[in-house]
Image (cartoon, helix red, strand yellow):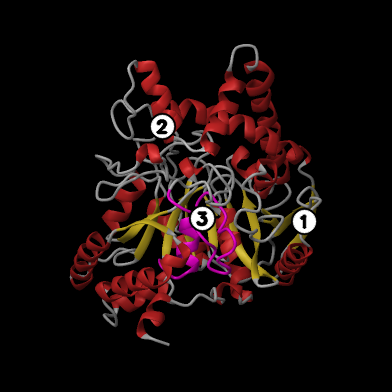
């Protein structure tokens, strides 16, 4: 094993210790990851923009900060950012032609918090266009491949961020989760993915898809690393009116290895026709492991789960229709000049947006249109309330809810791109948590053939501490987190 391989296999927590002990430098750590990107990313295409110069400057500054004894938890740690988080020193395109080359005049709040910590930015990662998709095939700038099998998707929409961590191109990355876009790709790529409670992390500077659903969260190879990242980005932000002014717990102190006294809910609705047997077997075994660690399993029901997918695909497109109306080519981004302003708008948006974005804008505009608003959008919000109430009743009985992250392992590139319904079903187990605004984590729990399977744990609002603690106990009792994708440079 080369020195580069040793450095890219380290967890962020281990790297923190090595950096503080001056056993390695931030520059060495950064160089190892940039070389890894150069070696493997042509096959993976996790990155849209590699920020080499910025990364080395940040690594130099991190080494100086470490030498002065003022290092923060993420000082010198190489991180990747989903390309819908605006940055002042690299383009932010949302993987769309309409924003090709756009550079923001300000940083997203989470980006600024990471800068303040002295983190190292390796680059911006690929995504489904405007985060609309479940496979990262909808990017205007090429498909991302799964490091476990490059003929398969990495999941989406944060597929680039998940693949970067799985391929050891970054220690930690940030993604966004609107209907499962952190947890589902984390599951497909065999890494940890955390969706915090809605309002726990500022959305300021996140290019909005569906504003009542979007939430930023981390990908990592261990629960501990995910907890470190959440501690850095969580907390109230006056720039985001949906950010909740609650104290941020010390997440690392909540990590545990014993589950005595923990009540784990198992929902009968989290089994659907078409689930792959390998997924069912791995998740069933994982839930049994939780029980062996001392947890009590409790059968629960979430009766409105069957309506979550339909409710989501009214709510999210409706909000997308409103949010994406700002992309008109007038002040920034692509502009296709035509004789009239109306024609300019039509050609700019028609040329700049891809097929999936257009599909969702049209669905959302229809749901919000006169004569249909009450029948579709208003009714969807009523059902959303029922879904939220299902979780509230369940959490009166249990501490977390355990189940599969996805009904299948990663599917083949191109196999669902022409079948939107089958593509949308990829998120059937992740969408309810977004509708209710609760936290959820996806963790590796086995293999089906040569591909990872993932366990999802859902928790009470703003109780990421318990979710992470239980996930950590499972992780310490198994070896799945220490299995690397068989990817050579």
Tag 1 and tag 3, C-beta contact below 8 Å: no
Q: Residue 241: which numbered mark, if any?
A: 2
* Position of residue 335 measured from the top left corner of the image (x, y, whole percent): 32, 30
Alpha carbon distance from label 1 to label 3: 22 Å
Number of the label disc, if any, that sits on residue 159: 3
| Element carrying mark 3 | helix
Q: Are the residues flagged by discs 1 and 2 in contact, CB closer than 8 Å? A: no
Tell me the distance, in whole angstroms, between the alpha carbons under discs 1 and 2.
39 Å
- Is tag 1's residue or tag 3's residue first in the polypeptide sequence? 3
Mark number for residue 275? 1
Magenta stretch contains residue 155: yes
Which of the two labelled residues, at mark 2 and mark 3, occupies the earlier sequence position? 3
Q: Is residue 105 left or right of residue 483?
A: left
Q: Position of residue 33 (x, y in %)?
A: 35, 71
Q: Which mark is residue 325?
A: none
The residue depicted at 79 percent of the width and 45 percent of the height is 301
């Amino acid at each position: 094993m080369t020195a580069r391989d040793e450095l890219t296999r380290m967890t962020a927590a281990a790297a923190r210790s090595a950096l503080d002990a001056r056993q390695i430098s931030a520059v060495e750590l950064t160089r190892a990851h940039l070389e890894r990107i150069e070696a493997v990313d042509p096959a993976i295409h996790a990155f849209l923009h590699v920020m080499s110069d910025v990364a080395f400057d940040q690594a130099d500054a991190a080494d100086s900060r470490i030498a002065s004894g003022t290092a923060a938890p993420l000082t010198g740690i190489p991180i990747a950012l989903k390309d819908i988080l605006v940055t002042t020193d690299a383009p932010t395109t949302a993987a769309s032609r309409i924003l090709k080359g756009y550079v923001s005049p300000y940083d997203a709040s989470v980006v600024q918090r990471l800068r303040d910590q002295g983190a190292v930015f390796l680059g911006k990662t690929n995504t489904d266009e405007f985060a609309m998709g479940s496979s990262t095939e909808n990017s205007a700038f090429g498909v991302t491949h799964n490091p476990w099998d490059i003929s398969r998707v990495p999941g989406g929409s944060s597929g680039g961020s998940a693949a970067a961590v799985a391929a050891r191109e970054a220690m930690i990355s940030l993604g966004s989760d609107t209907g499962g876009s952190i947890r589902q790709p984390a599951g497909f790529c065999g890494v940890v993915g955390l969706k915090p409670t809605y309002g726990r992390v500022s959305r300021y500077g996140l290019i909005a898809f569906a504003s009542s659903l979007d939430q930023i969260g981390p990908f990592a190879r261990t629960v501990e690393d995910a907890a470190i990242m959440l501690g850095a980005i969580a907390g109230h932000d006056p720039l985001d009116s949906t950010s909740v002014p609650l104290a941020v717990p010390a997440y690392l102190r909540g990590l545990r290895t014993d589950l005595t006294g923990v009540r784990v809910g198992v929902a009968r609705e989290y089994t659907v026709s078409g689930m792959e047997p390998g997924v069912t077997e791995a998740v069933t075994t994982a839930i049994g492991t939780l029980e062996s660690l001392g947890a009590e399993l409790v059968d629960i029901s979430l009766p409105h789960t069957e309506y979550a997918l339909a409710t989501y695909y009214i709510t999210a497109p409706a909000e997308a229709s409103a949010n994406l109306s700002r992309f008109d080519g007038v002040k920034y981004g692509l502009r296709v000049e035509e004789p009239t302003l109306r024609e300019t708008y039509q050609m700019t948006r028609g040329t700049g947006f891809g097929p999936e974005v257009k599909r969702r804008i049209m669905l959302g505009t229809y749901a919000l249109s006169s004569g249909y608003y009450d029948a579709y959008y208003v009714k969807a919000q009523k059902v959303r309330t029922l879904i939220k109430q299902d979780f509230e009743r369940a959490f009166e009985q249990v501490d977390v809810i355990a189940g599969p992250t996805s009904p299948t392992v990663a599917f083949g590139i191109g196999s669902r791109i022409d079948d939107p319904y089958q593509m949308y079903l990829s998120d059937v187990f992740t969408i309810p948590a977004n509708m209710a605004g609760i936290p959820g984590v996806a963790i590796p729990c086995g293999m089906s053939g040569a591909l990872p399977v993932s366990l999802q744990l859902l928790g009470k609002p703003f109780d990421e501490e318990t979710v992470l603690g239980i996930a950590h106990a499972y992780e310490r009792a198994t070896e799945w987190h220490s299995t690397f994708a068989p990817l050579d440079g």
